[in-house]
Amino acid sequence: MINFTNYVRENINNDGILFIVDLQKEFSEFIPENMVDAVIKYCNNFHSVYQIWDSNKADKPSYTFPNQKSAIIKKYGTKFSDDLEQTIKQLNEKYPTAKEGDIFEFDDVDSYVVRVKNNHSWFYVPEAMANIFKQLSGKNVILIGGAAGECLEDIYVAMRSKIFNINANYNKDYCYSAKTSNKQKYNQKIQSKII
């Protein structure tokens, strides 16, 4: 299992690229108060900011961040498509010992499913996301947002797969999880300890 351990602070070589995952109003109950404002300031340290947002409960991203190059849509899990669910069933049967990070490409479109070892089991990488990941192959990027151990981890595992080969690292100072809440004030000094 790929652990939530590739953790960095500000000084890492990150090629000036930041990915923000699921920092949106739909998950506000888990996002500490003032964290969005802190992320907005943090974005100014990067020349390229990419937002990946979940369309499960939203029609558009909640925010536009400084230096944002693209907002990439994703869907939670795989249950949004009967065809995808059938593909996942076939992969589970054909590759019962698939390891985290094993990735499979669809024949008809430039999209993928990657094996993850959290409560999602598989993560669907749509074509638009795959194209950006391919452009960034070999780059060092920082991942923030949430939720730790869930969607944030799905993106991390996909990026580090052999197909995309992105050197992704978390900055846990700007991450949230199911353990965090909007009832707590964001504090960069302790955020990494409470996720």
Image (cartoon, rainbow, N blue to C red):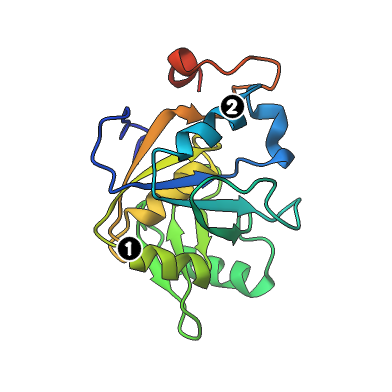
What is the three-letter code of the residue carrying label 1? Phe
Measured Cα–Cα span from mark 1 to mark 2:
29 Å
Front residue (pair 118, 60): 60
Q: Residue at x 57, y 45 (%)?
A: 65
Task: Tell me if residue 189 comes above or below residue 134 in the rendering.
Answer: above
Residue wearing tag 1: 164
Depth check, mark 1 against mark 2: the one in front is 2
Q: Are there few (<14), some (14-19), or many (20+) residues within 10 Å of tag 2?
A: many
- Direction from residue 169 to residue 44 in the image, left or right: right
> Picture coordinates of residue 171 (x, y %)?
39, 32
Find numbered disc 1 in the image and state the secondary structure of the residue it sits on: loop
Task: Tell me if residue 69 comes above or below residue 32 in the rendering.
Answer: below
> Picture coordinates of residue 150 (x, y %)?
53, 41
Front residue (pair 35, 29): 35
Residue wearing tag 2: 35
Among numbered discs 1 and 2, the one appearing first in the sequence:
2
Front residue (pair 12, 90): 12
Find numbered disc 2 in the image and state the secondary structure of the residue it sits on: helix
What is the three-letter code of the residue carrying label 2? Met
> Picture coordinates of residue 50 (x, y %)?
49, 53
